[in-house]
Structure formats: C-alpha cells, structure tokens
Amino acid sequence: MKTLNINSDYIGAISSILCLIHCMLTPVFFLFQADIWFLNNEYNFSWDLLNCLFLIVSILAVHRSIRNTSNDNIKRIMFILCTSLSLLILNEIFAIFLIPEFFIYILAISLALAHIYNLNYCRCDDDNCCSKTIRN
C-alpha cells in the first residue's frame, strides 16, 4: 500500500504562487481580449470563479497550517494575511473600493512566504501531524 503525505504548507504556498501568477497574467489576457473569444465580455464570471477557487484552497491550507504549527506568531501572521487577502479578493469581485492590484500581489507573496517559513516550525509530537496521510 502506497502512502502519500500532503502538507498544508506546500499546498498553501503553491496556491498562493498560482494566485499571484493568475493575478499578474489577467491584465495581459485582457490586453489581448480581441484575440481570445471567451474574454469578450466586460464582466467575466469565470475569472471570479478562479479567484474564489484560489481563495478557498488558501483558506483551507491556512486553517490546517494554523492548527498544526507550534509557532504562535506564525499563526497570527498567517491568519492576518489570509483574512486580508480574502477581503481584497472579495473587494475585487464585488468592486466595492478601488484598490490597486499591487496589494494583492504583496499579500499573495507574503502568504506563500509564511507557508514556506512555517515548514520549518511545524513541530509536533507525531511525525505526520502536519501532513494528512492518504493511503492508496
């Protein structure tokens, strides 16, 4: 039987980096919207769904990382970063305030770095407490 360990910090870091890439490439796609048939609408629901997908994965990864880390400061930092990023993404979806994309980039990078930093502070009594074990 093969065992696969999934660490929430790896998932969170990858999700944050993919979110950052998505946020950076979106303006490029809109520049070439005449060539891309599915971006011809002024408002495109699929981009918001992708934002929500990254947001949900990030929230789940942060929740699991906060439960498993032994460093109280990283718990607070990850919670603040995730909450701030969530609020900014929801603000972008609903267009409540005009906030530059730059802040989303900074928060996504910071959250990815927090997950990477947390990999060093995930100290538990059990070797697999920071990983969810999946058996095939």
Image (cartoon, rainbow, N blue to C red):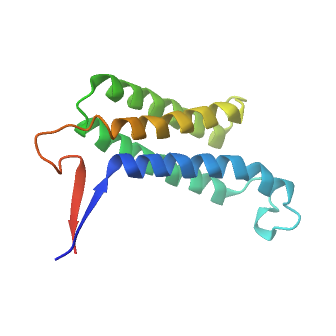
Image quadrant in which you'd find residue 109: top right
Taking the spot 78% from the left edge, 62% from the top edge, the residue there is 39
Residue at the far right in the pictured view: 34
Residue 60 in sight: no
Nearer the observer, 60 or 112: 112
Residue 54 in sight: yes
Residue 37 location (% of width, % of height): 81, 70
Compared to residue 73, the image places residue 7 above or below, namely below
Taking the spot 69% from the left edge, 28% from the top edge, the residue there is 97
In the rendered structure, the answer to whether residue 14 lies left or right of residue 72 reads right
How many numbered marks does the figure carry? 0
Compared to residue 27, the image places residue 34 above or below, namely below
In the rendered structure, the answer to whether residue 70 lies left or right of residue 59 reads left
Nearer the observer, 53 or 66: 66
Residue 73 location (% of width, % of height): 33, 22
Image quadrant in which you'd find residue 121: top left
Residue 11 location (% of width, % of height): 40, 52
Q: Quadrant of the C terminus?
A: bottom left
Taking the spot 11% from the left edge, 46% from the top edge, the residue there is 126
Residue at the far front in the pictured view: 120
Nearer the observer, 31 or 17: 17
Compared to residue 46, the image places residue 74 above or below, namely above
In the rendered structure, the answer to whether residue 106 lies left or right of residue 63 reads right
Q: Quadrant of the N terminus?
A: bottom left
Image quadrant in which you'd find residue 90: top right
Nearer the observer, 101 or 132: 132
Residue at the far left in the pictured view: 125
Residue 128 location (% of width, % of height): 18, 51
Taking the spot 48% from the left edge, 40% from the top edge, the residue there is 112
